[in-house]
Image (spheres, coloured by chain):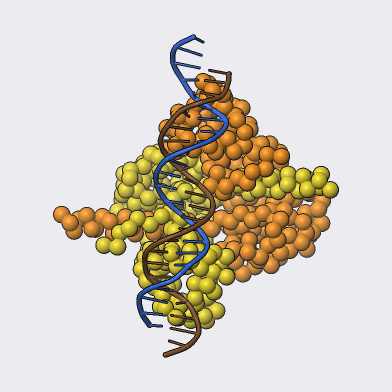
Chain colours: A orange, B yellow, C blue, D brown
Amino acid sequence: MEEKDISRAVIKRLPRYYRYLGELMEDGVERISSNELSGRMKVTASQIRQDLNNFGGFGQQGYGYNVKYLHSEIAKILGLDRTHNMIIVGAGNLGQALANYTQFEKQGFKIVGIFDVNPVMQGVSVRGIEIRMIDELPEFVKDNHVEIATLTLPKAKALDMAKLLVDVGVKAIWNFAHTDLNLFMPEDVIVENVHLSESLMRLSYNLSRFEKDHKQEQGKI
Amino acid sequence: MEEKDISRAVIKRLPRYYRYLGELMEDGVERISSNELSGRMKVTASQIRQDLNNFGGFGQQGYGYNVKYLHSEIAKILGLDRTHNMIIVGAGNLGQALANYTQFEKQGFKIVGIFDVNPVMQGVSVRGIEIRMIDELPEFVKDNHVEIATLTLPKAKALDMAKLLVDVGVKAIWNFAHTDLNLFMPEDVIVENVHLSESLMRLSYNLSRFEKDHKQEQGKI
DNA sequence: TAGATTGTTAATCGATTAACAATC
DNA sequence: TAGATTGTTAATCGATTAACAATC
């Protein structure tokens, strides 16, 4: 119906709007104007209005936006109005850390299973969830309506596992492996990459650049 | 000197180039053209050439780019040609997972200390690194030339800790807390945010959108 | 009604792509 | 030298900002 193609840039900002609106709700704020929100979030009011209007007119002239309403509408847009069953594949440090992280559950992402390829892990439990072996995966995904797989395996094992996950019916992969799965996945499988080392490199770039700038300034004096 | 301001979009792609060049090196590839790399990475050859030329002419007409040379030049640009001392602040699941992750060390990010606010953690060791209390922080940062702090504390404690870290001389914060520190930090402090829940929400958005599209298609039949 | 603020169109800015002359 | 491929300028595309009429 309302099927314009929304730009990636807009999607990237939505969760941030959602977070700020959540905070405003906690603070008991009932309504907010694009201009006021603009001040808090350091984006332009114009951009806020443009972004939101991609999805519909959530505001009211002369009033602004109702915080609670807008929050719940963005939740719907982001698919946070329902539960998503999720498994974690790769029970190493990162996988276990994510399994222990209760925040996701509150947002509707329910961790229903943890898998690993290493037999040593079999039977070990994380937050009450027993680690299973991969041979149980196909049945488990079907029986538990698993939509999302969090992939926390080393790069070398990631692609083959991703293919397997797709074969057994997983719809989306949250990829923490340092490799670009999306290039090898079918069109209809969602891949969201979290490349931590790339993030750290960007930090490093900015650090180096700043130090260079600083040295230059001193040199100029 | 060569101080054009490089756009964020370019910086975001640099680590990816670096990764692909690393893989090419491992595969023993000596030279590569922008066109060939374009095919592998699914970006345009034009963009590759434009991106690289922000930093200098690393290629040669009629030949392409020397993989090893380009790899090392990008390393320099990203500040990976030297060691960065890093501490982890927040020894919860995620903090410990990051501490256990040896990959960063290989890229020059050396974890020299782990800190927490919870006295229960005191003296516990992660990968041979003892968890310390915050009162030791100021001296530690100075003595160990700490540049980067990885911040893996809950949101509520994150901002105050960030301010403290800046006060004691930390130059950059790798922020895993669900809050936008950058809005409250001095200009000269680098903040790189990793908002995992935002990433998961983007995945969720795409998942929901796809399902909607799919339903529509079925409806049309 | 008057004032405020949205929704939306138009203008600007920036980033990507295309084209091609320079040159190895 | 001829062929290949870069570096770079120009053209296009998309995203952001500004402006303002619509309307609560």
Q: Position of residue A41 (x, y in %)?
A: 45, 36
- Judge whether residue A10 can be spotted in this image: yes
A17 or A64: nearer the viewer: A64
In this view, A29 is above or below A142: above
Residue, x 43% and y 63% (percent of image)?
A: B51
C24 or B103: nearer the viewer: C24
- Judge whether residue A101 can be spotted in this image: no
Q: Position of residue A173 (x, y in %)?
A: 66, 55
Give the residue at the far right of this rendering. B221
In this view, B53 is above or below B197: below
- How many numbered dots are placed on residues in this image? 0
Give the residue at the far left of this rendering. A221
Residue, x 35% and y 55% (percent of image)?
A: B5
Q: Position of residue B218 (x, y in %)?
A: 81, 47
Q: Position of residue A157 (x, y in %)?
A: 65, 68
Residue, x 48% and y 64% (percent of image)?
A: B47
In the rendered structure, the answer to whether residue B41 lies left or right of residue A219 reads: right
A3 or B19: nearer the viewer: A3
Residue, x 78% and y 59% (percent of image)?
A: A168
In the rendered structure, the answer to whether residue B198 lies left or right of residue B135 reads: right
In the rendered structure, the answer to whether residue D19 lies left or right of residue A196 reads: left
Q: Quadrant of residue A123?
A: bottom right
* Image quarter hosting the N terminus of chain B: bottom left
Q: Quadrant of residue A160?
A: bottom right
